[in-house]
Every structure is written in structure tokens, then in C-alpha cells.
Amino acid sequence: MVASLEKQVALVTGAAKRIGRSIALRLAGAGARVVVNYRHSAAEAEATVREIEAAGGQALSMQADVTKAEQVRAMFAEIEKRCGRLDILVNNAGTFSPAPFGEMSEAQWDEMLDTNLKSQVLCAQAAAVLMKRQGRGRIINLSSIGGLLPWPKYAHYCVSKAGVIMLTRCLARSLAPEITVNSVAPGTIQFPGELPDEDYIRRTPLKKTGTGNDIAEAVLFLAQSDFITGQVLVVDGGRTLA
Ligand SMILES: NC(=O)c1ccc[n+]([C@@H]2O[C@H](COP(=O)([O-])OP(=O)(O)OC[C@H]3O[C@@H](n4cnc5c(N)ncnc54)[C@H](OP(=O)(O)O)[C@@H]3O)[C@@H](O)[C@H]2O)c1
């Protein structure tokens, strides 16, 4: 493929492992210099950077807890210093765990909303300053089919991801015309070593779960588009149709 993201800088939050890693590799493969953000997974983030470099790409790792405004500010200052610009922000960092509604603690609610939603607000605010100055930018927020379907044991997760979808639509208007803002809503994505999610496979028209690369391809498509904003691209094998 033609390296269409050449000379562009992309930040992928939570990119040491799993979906974030797949996105980082794909954007780097398309020519972007990729900032691999992580919170705890330093060794895995370094491994992602090395994998990108071994394939001829450019990357650097950067530690920050994206739920903390001060750490987000410091990370963006470091990006500006080391890279000079930011063209693509992929808000990928997230968390997922059940909490039956009657037993859900305040701490569980706050952690879910901070990690999945507040982090995207903080990073988008900081990214928008750089992107507006450049006159162009792309923000892609990872939501989930959990933001479209109400899952009884995951009210805090579903609300956080529904919030990501509305945040995407609001920011698409707030940050236009320079910046496009879109969301990718994955269905169940599985990684090597995980037991197959038979229930998901049975209920899904395409009879399979997704891969990290399925999500990375959708992110790359939105990063390259010039005329799509405020949209949610559902990548779920048709699960939300059934
Ligand atoms: N996997 C799925 O089936 C699926 C389905 C629907 C939607 N999604 C969404 O897709 C995205 C990626 O999914 P995933 O399964 O790959 O996620 P994950 O493995 O649960 O988490 C990805 C990374 O997020 C980082 N992270 C968490 N809190 C952070 C914080 N405060 N600051 C910085 N980084 C933080 C972690 O980094 P460290 O390890 O460095 O701490 C972690 O490696 C998430 O937004 C998720 O909600 C996933």
C-alpha cells in the first residue's frame, strides 16, 4: 500500500497491547510516526516500538495515565517537543469489567467513566490545540457495541461508551472544519490464547469474533478520510443486527 500517512504523527493511547498495539502497527505501516502511550505496560510498549522500527517505521513510547489532566498535559507537551506536531489522535485506552447494578461501588463507576470517557475528553482537548494550529487533524475514539446495546451487568461500561458516541458527535461539530472526529465501535475482539467466545460467535451473522487488525483497518480508513465526521463505524461481524 502507498504510505499515505507519511510525515504525519499519530498518538495511540493504551497502545502497548491488544487493539491499541494493532492500531499502532497499522498506522506506522501506513507511514505515520507513532507515539505508543502506556500506563503500566512499559515492556510491552517498548516491544511495540521495536516491532514498528524493525518493519522500517518510526515510533516512540510515552508513559501517562490519561485519566489525569496533569499527566495528559505533560504528554502533549512532550509530543510537541519531540515530534513538533500531532495529526492523528486515537483514544483507545479503556477498561472493561462487570458490576451488577445493585452492588456497583462509587469507585467502580468513577474508574469506568474516568478511564473510558474522561480520558478521551482530556486527550481531545489537548490534541485540538495542536491540530487547530496546524489547520488539520483526525480524532478517532474507540467506543463499543456496548454503547449501543444495554448490558445489564455492565451499566457503567455501556454508559461510558454511549458517552463516547455522543462526545464524538459533539466534538465533530465543535472542532470542525479543521478536525474530523469519528468513532470505531468494536464487537468482541479476541487475541491468541483466549478461549473462543462461543456465545458471540453463535449470535453473530458472520459467525466469528474480530481481530485487532479488523479494528486497525477501520481506524486507518477514518484517519485517511476527508469527508466523514461525527460517525460511528461498527465493526462487529453484524452482531448488532441480530
Ligand atoms: N477487546 C474487545 O473485545 C473490545 C470490544 C469493544 C470495545 N473495545 C474497546 O477498544 C479499546 C481497546 O480494547 P482492548 O481490549 O485492547 O483494551 P484493554 O486491553 O482492556 O486496555 C488497553 C490498554 O488501555 C490502557 N489503559 C487503561 N487505563 C489507562 C490509563 N488510565 N492511562 C493510560 N492507559 C490506560 C492499558 O495500558 P497499560 O497496560 O499500559 O496499563 C491497556 O493496555 C478500549 O477502549 C475498549 O473499550 C474493546
Image (cartoon, rainbow, N blue to C red):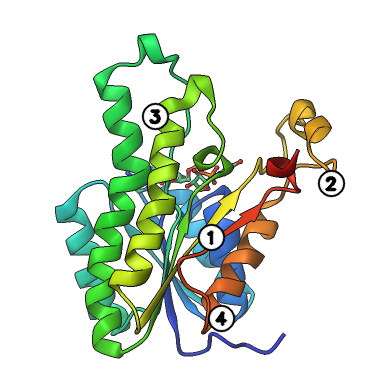
Q: Nearer the viewer, residue 228 or 185?
A: 228
Does mark 1 have its CB less than 8 Å from ligand 1? no
Which three-letter amino acid code belongs to the residue tagged 4? Answer: Gln
Residue 1 visible here: yes
Q: Look at mark 1 in the image and give the residue it sits on.
A: 48
**Camera-side mark, 2 or 1:** 2
Give the residue at x 37% y 9%.
102
Rounded to the nearest angstrom, the CA distance separating label 2 from label 1 is 30 Å
Give me the residue at 62% from left, 62% from top: 216
State the quadrant of the C terminus.
Answer: top right
Q: Which residue is mark 2?
A: 206
Q: Nearer the viewer, residue 148 or 105?
A: 148
| Residue at the spot 46% in from the left edge and 50% down from the top edge | 43
- The numbered mark at residue 224 is 4
Give, as a three-letter code, the residue at label 2.
Answer: Leu
Residue linked to disc 3: 156
- Local packing at callout 1 (Cα closer than 10 Å; few below 14, some 14-19, many 20+) is many
- Amino acid on which the number 3 mark rests in the picture: His
Mark 3–mark 4 Cα distance, whole angstroms, equals 32 Å
Density class for disc 3 (Cα within 10 Å; few <14, some 14-19, many ≥20) is: many
Which amino acid, by three-letter code, is at mark 1? Thr
- Horizontal placement of 188 versus 69: left or right? right
